[in-house]
Amino acid sequence: MATTIAVMSAGQMQQVGTPDQIYAAPASRFVAEFIGTPKLNMIPLHPPLSHLAQHLHQRFSLHDGEHTELCGIRPEEIVLSADAGNNGVAMTIDNIMPTGGSWIIELVTGNDRLFHSTQLRPRWQPQQQVFCQLPSHSLHFFNRHGFRHEIATQ
């Protein structure tokens, strides 16, 4: 594998960096959705606000000049717990899909749907309620133009 890669879209350079840099800090929505399997979870942050969007609006200053449109989180960065803990969001397990050495857990609350991936055999069952932790350092915010920007916590 190359030590430095370039991601392009329609002939335009989107980002140059190491594979880890591009995966961990995508410069744009295009790069974030292009790299990684399963795909990055995207949460729309514009009205009408979903349950997850309301949760994120409460945790972060999203009324800035950047006009934050989306929040992304990689499936393996979601932390599941039996209790709410710190900023946990109650969700229901809709499905658990074995993929051969790993599992994808489909989570729902209202109209929101997230996918969590793990290499540990899930201790959960479908239809069980769990709490999802969305760690601040794992969230990727994108403005109305699709570019990444940093958000301050409240």
Image (spheres, rainbow, N blue to C red):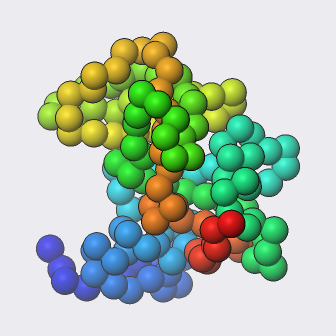
Q: Is residue 40 left or right of residue 146?
A: left
Counting labels gives: 0
Instruction: Looking at the picture, tell me which residue is in the foreground, 66 or 15.
Output: 66
Instruction: Looking at the picture, tell me which residue is in the foreground, 92 or 48.
Output: 92
Q: Is residue 33 left or right of residue 150?
A: left
Q: Quadrant of the N terminus?
A: bottom left
Looking at the rendering, which quadrant does residue 80 occupy?
A: top left
Residue 15 screen position, x and y as percent: 44, 82
Residue 59 screen position, x and y as percent: 66, 57
Residue 52 screen position, x and y as percent: 66, 43
Q: Residue at x 74, y 40 (%)?
A: 50
Residue 130 screen position, x and y as percent: 47, 27
Image vertical order of residue 6 relative to residue 153, above or below: below
Q: Residue furthest right?
A: 47
Image vertical order of residue 70 relative to residue 98, above or below: below
Q: Quadrant of the C terminus?
A: bottom right
Q: Residue at x 28, y 73 (%)?
A: 20
Q: Residue at x 80, y 54 (%)?
A: 46
Q: Residue at x 71, y 38 (%)?
A: 51
> Is residue 35 in view?
yes
> Is residue 113 in view?
no
